[in-house]
Image (spheres, rainbow, N blue to C red):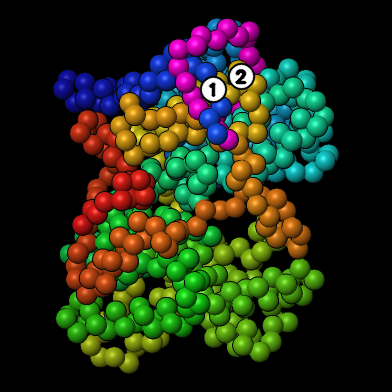
Amino acid sequence: MGKESTKSSLEEKRLGFKVEVFPSLKNVQDAYLKEEGNVLKLMAHETQHSPPLRVGVMFSGGPAPGGLNVLWGMYKGLKEIHSESVLVGFLDGAGGFLADNQLVIGEEEIATIKNQGGFTLLGTGRTKIETEEQMQEAAAVVKKNRLQGLVFIGGDDTNTNAYHLAKYFEKEKVRCSVVGIPKTIDGDLKGEGIEASFGFDTATKTYSSMIGNLNKDALSAKKYWFFVKLMGRSASHVTLECALQTRPNLAFISEEVQKKKTTLKEIVEEVAKAVVERAKEDKNYGTVLIPEGLIEACSDMKAMIDACNVNRSVGKGIEALTGNEKELFESLPLSIQKQLQKDLDPHGNMQLSHVSTDQLIAEMVEERVKDNEAVKFKVVPVFYGYDGRCALPSNFDATYCYNLGMIAAILVRDRKTGFMAAIKNLHLPVSEWDGMAIPIDGMMSTERRHGKEKLVIAKALVDLKGAPFKEFSKKRGKWIKSDAYLAPGPIQFDDEASAFEKTLTLVLERKKRSFF
């Protein structure tokens, strides 16, 4: 009976009975948005009376833990605004929205999604709303469903599309607020008032838990090198956070590699040197963290990849490579050569996520140390990516997302468009959080895509002068030869003392204090 009771209480907790609401959202009807500089700040004690609202919502891009709580927060906020408000979910992302493939979300649906992982209720997709024809279709769906608001839950591309659609609606006098919610486990949608994208906290804790297990295995079996590839093509936030949480022997940050114009050969040499140095102390084991986009950051590999992308844009293949780029390509393991020749990504570039960067570096290191008799080099390549996208959200992400959803409801009620829901002071207790809305146009910049300049939200890269990277760079030298491993363990949902532990990245950025 005791076991059944414990199981029941844990299930009940994950159904949403522990999510907190920060003070200015205790009563949505008493919350309002006030201009403060170029942002909208959420205030309390000015009761708003509103007619029923009809609001559409969709997920876009890869899943991230906590997304379902955004729906829960939106639903709760809309119902507090008016009991007859309606939340319309569009299935399978923007493609489902343009096709008007919808699900009206009610109490029954909300009861099944509280604090759960994935985007299971609505699904997601990669369709973008960016052409004139697509925007016309979007306007038609909005008018057909009499929507006063449309909420995009996604990353930088999704919120870029939200910005352009908001501008289009204003130009065409379509009375519908367009609101964005910052989502991405990569952590590269932040800045300009966005302290963190949701999902990053849970994903990095999930990965760190598994890396910690590998650390323990390395130290127990004493015969394996684990090469761990982590999500993050453009930015290395995930790798940096996981390194701070687990203390691997080596971890590479793409932004640093790019700034120093480090070559792939130099990275291989660095790893090989660490392998040899540890072998001298009879430590033929270790862990290495590798961001997904590392090879593109290497100066020699980038030159080769750029040449390949240019060739493919005009219908030529790998065989068109010449000079150093051709020599480099032919020096790569055959398995990697094949991976580099797969289909292009949505931006017209090589799909580097298909490249086993961990395997590439491991094979090249193996070749480098094979003649050293002291080295016993057994490699286990690992990729942690999809493993963390649909995990049960941490208590932080669960609460963060619920409140973002409520802010989105208020933005629609107050007819604000072209804004992203945001919360500041996330490193503090929930009682000290501040809700606000950030104008998306303040985050826009030009970027070259498919050979053309486009106005987009730029990805936030790791700040090499920021506190998190400084903390990492100060300590990493000691991790190479020592066994300073940490194993943080699985995410805790029911320990009140640690319920709202934040990522080290967030706390270091805000509080700038050491953890070591």
Residue 48, above or below 397: above
Query: Which numbered marker is on residue 465?
Result: none
Residue 364, above or below 64: below
Which mark is nearer the camera, 2 or 1? 1
Residue shown at 27% from the left, 44% from the top: 490
What residue would you read off at disc 2?
Answer: 414
Residue shown at 52% from the left, 18% from the top: 32
Residue type (three-letter) at the residue carrying disc 1: Leu
Q: Magenta residues, as a range?
A: 38-58
Quarter of the image where one finds residue 272: bottom left
Is disc 2 placed on a helix, strand or loop?
A: loop
Foreground pick, 516 / 509: 509
Quadrant location of the C terminus?
bottom left
Labels 2 & 1 near each other (Cβ < 8 A)? yes
What is the crowding at mark 2: few (fewer than 14 residues within 10 Å), some, or many (at least 20)? Answer: some
Quarter of the image where one finds residue 315: bottom right
What residue would you read off at disc 1?
Answer: 33
